[in-house]
Amino acid sequence: MAKPNKSLPTREWIEQLRRRFPCEKELDRILTRKLQRRAGPPYSPVSLETLVSGTEALLRSQLKDGFEITKAQWLSGGASKLQMSFLLKWNQPGVGPTTTPMVLRMEPSESLVETSRLREFQIIKAMQDVVLVPPAYWIDPDGSYLPYPAIVYGFVTGVTKPSNVVSNVSGLGTDLGPALRPILAPQFVDCLARIHLFDWRRAELGAFDRPAPGTVEAAEWQLNYWERVWEEDINEDVPLMRLAIAWLRKNMPVADSISVIHGDYRTGNFLYTEHDNRISCWLDWEMAHLGDRHEDIAWVHNITYGHYAEDGKTFLICGMMPESEFCAAYEKASGLAIDQTRLRYYKIKNAFQIATIALATPYRVAGGGKSHQDILVAWIMGAGYPILNDLRLLLEEVL
């Protein structure tokens, strides 16, 4: 079979991928749309005026009374998404006339991680009474009013790191410092336990397929999704990734229960207020899904998100605490046991996923000029090789 032109994907190739890697319906729709649009024009800069007018059109479709958008400005953060903050003067139901700080979060033509704004909207809604999240107001799931699919949620105050600390992109390797760690770490663990204990069956999560407990569906669906992304985006073969996916397929674990999985639970994705050092909001739910809790626990452990303590010997996961302390604290907070075999499995699965995000998709997005942050996206590719080395070390433990 001829090598496909991934920059000009054919309908036949897209359908072949869909058959090879069946995944959740909404995720299949998102990935299929990505490939169908790939041959289209590159990302074109979007002005604030365009975002404001699109947001106004969205709000007119949702609100009966008049409103006014003021003080619109670009908002940093969000990695590969476009974000605008603004004030909305409106007649809020149950509140009356008020002014509310809000954020518009919109994807570019093709994103570093292609995800569903509908799923993001639904999971934030579901988490309102579980952990602190921004209030989710409106959604444009198909880009009917804005240039691309978008979500509007409330602005929450806080910082991702101490104001006097310099960190890497997206909060990678943030050093919170020895005084702050013991204050934030228990909150960090408690929030994860709350998420995993939440009874998601009572939530409106229509865009999420539900893997069955007592089966390997949770692992298999995730493997199908991320191997499909790898095949769609990578420019050159990487034998180590082939070895990893073969091992992952052969050793898929049975999930004893199904939980909400944040999907990117780490330092850098929560805000805290510096006057009292309390976590004020959990962000970046775009990779959330239903699955095995060990996937989130393993994500916390990834070396990309941690660093060594001041002694130069003790590795702090997510810059918080040593692995043994984290696991003990999680089991106490949740009442759920951590299965070391499943934890090891998801460490390898997550390393495969992160390598895909770093090595495969950035090449395709930057090469096609599909993002507003081509330099950042290309920079991320450089992190791919240390991540591959981490994957190698993890595989050496099991092979």
Image: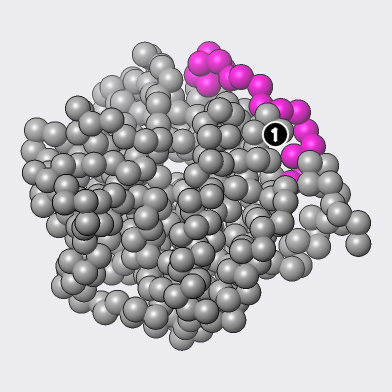
Residue 48 in the magenta stretch? The answer is: yes
Q: Position of residue 374 (x, y in %)?
A: 59, 29
In the rendered structure, does residue 347 fall within the stretch colored magenta?
no
Across and down, in percent, residue 206 comes to 51, 60
Instruction: Report the residue at 74% width, 68% height from top.
Output: 20
Q: What residue type is labelled 1?
A: Gly
Location of residue 280 with respect to 346 vertically, above or below:
above
Q: Residue at x 21, y 58 (%)?
A: 314
Where is residue 221 drawn, in percent x and y?
58, 69
In the image, farthest residue toward the right: 1
Q: Give the range drawn in magenta.
A: 35-53
Q: Name the residue under label 1.
A: 367
For residue 116, say whether it is visible: no
> In front: 139, or 346?
346
x, y percent for residue 386: 48, 51
Q: Which of 301 and 19 is in front in this view?
A: 301
Would residue 227 appear left or right of 198 to someone viewing this image? right
The structure residue drawn at horizontal position 34% and vertical position 61%, both measured from the top left corner, is 301
Res. 10 in view: yes
362 to the left or right of 349: right
